[in-house]
Every structure is written in structure tokens, then in C-alpha cells.
Amino acid sequence: MQQPVTRNKHLGLFTAQLLRRPWRIVALAPSSRALGDQMAAEIDLGGAVVELGAGTGKITESILAAGVDEGDLVLLEMNAAFCKLLRQRFPRATVLDWNAQRVGEVELANVRSVVSGLPLLSMPVAVQNNIVGGAFKLMQPGGAYVQFTYGPKPPVATPVREALGLTWEKRDKIWMNLPPARSYVFRKPA
């Protein structure tokens, strides 16, 4: 009985923040477990993981379930209410109340994967470049940048992909997400 109460509490916080800051929270609902699991399946378990836009921690749950140690997880979230919840839910993770454009400033060695729940396509190309470029600056060679999207095209703008020399693969659409979404995995060839 305890788990449904917790889920409703997190959904209530998400909805309240969406109503207060609709320009910052673009999603209609927290990501589904199926989308989180799809994204977490792309993580290289050989190192630390950074999650951008961790929200209420739905994708974080999948990252931990995939085998990442909570102490190897850094969560970037710029919503103070979400940061407070994340610190309560994941006390061994590092929660930074930062804008994702600062991801390249994270002081952490051995980062193999960056997972993003950000509404990247709604951001200007320069902002996307700062975020994705910073993620690849932080990661070790061969690292994976995992990003989901609701749309039909890659969630990183063409000029950013070309400037960074990224390759990508798209995954199946998750119909049980609201709205349906899919993840893409971006890599920078050596």
C-alpha cells in the first residue's frame, strides 16, 4: 500500500511544479518506467552516470535498477522542489541544483554515460550545443549520451550533431509513455 501513496505524492509535486513553471517543465507527466528502462539499458555500467533534468526521479529509478550504484550517480536539476525530493529519495547520489548547461563543470572522473530528460528540441541551438558538448567533454571516449524525445526526428539539432561529429541510433517508441516517446543514443566516434 505504501508505494501508490508515494507515487501519487510525486505526481502531485510534478503537477504543481508544471502549473507554477510551465515554461520550464515541458512534459505532461513524469516519464514512464518503460521509457526509463529503455534509457537505462544504454548505460555503460563501467563508470559514473550523470542525469540531466532528473525531475522527480522516475528515470533515476530505472538507472539504479539497471545496476548503477547510487554513489556513482550525479543528478542535475534546476527546480529546487525537485532537488529537495531527489535528495530525500536518493541520499547517496550527488544532487546539484544546476542548469544543465553547466554539465561540463561537473568534477567527476570515469563518466561513461549521460542520460537526459531535458526538452532539448525546445531549446535554442546554442543552448543545446552547451549541454550536449559539455556532456561529451565530461564523458570518457566512447561514452553514450541518451536523450528521449516525443517527436519524429533526433532530439539534438542537426547543427549540434554536425559540429560535435555525433552518430546516433534510435530506439523503439514507448507507447505507454504520456505522450509516447523514444530514446536516442548519441556517441562521438574516436
Image (cartoon, grey):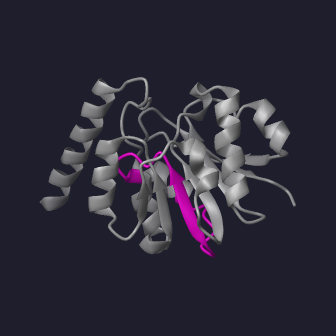
Residue interval drawn in magenta: 40-58
Please name the residue shown 84% across and 38% down the image.
163
Q: How many marks?
A: 0
Q: Residue 160, percent across and down?
A: 77, 36
**Residue 74 position (above or below residue 124):** below
Q: Nearer the viewer, residue 153 or 23?
A: 23
**Residue 25 rendering spot, x and y as whole percentages:** 41, 31
- The secondary structure making up most of the magenta span is loop
Magenta highlight on residue 57: yes
Residue placed most toward the observer, 180 or 80: 80
Q: Quadrant of the N terminus?
A: bottom left
Query: x and y percent of residue 68 in the render?
Result: 50, 72
Q: Visible in this render: residue 33?
A: no
Q: Does residue 187 appear in the picture of this structure?
A: yes
Say which residue appears at 57% left-offset and 26% top-offset: 122
**Residue 158: horizontal and vertical position, in percent?**
78, 31
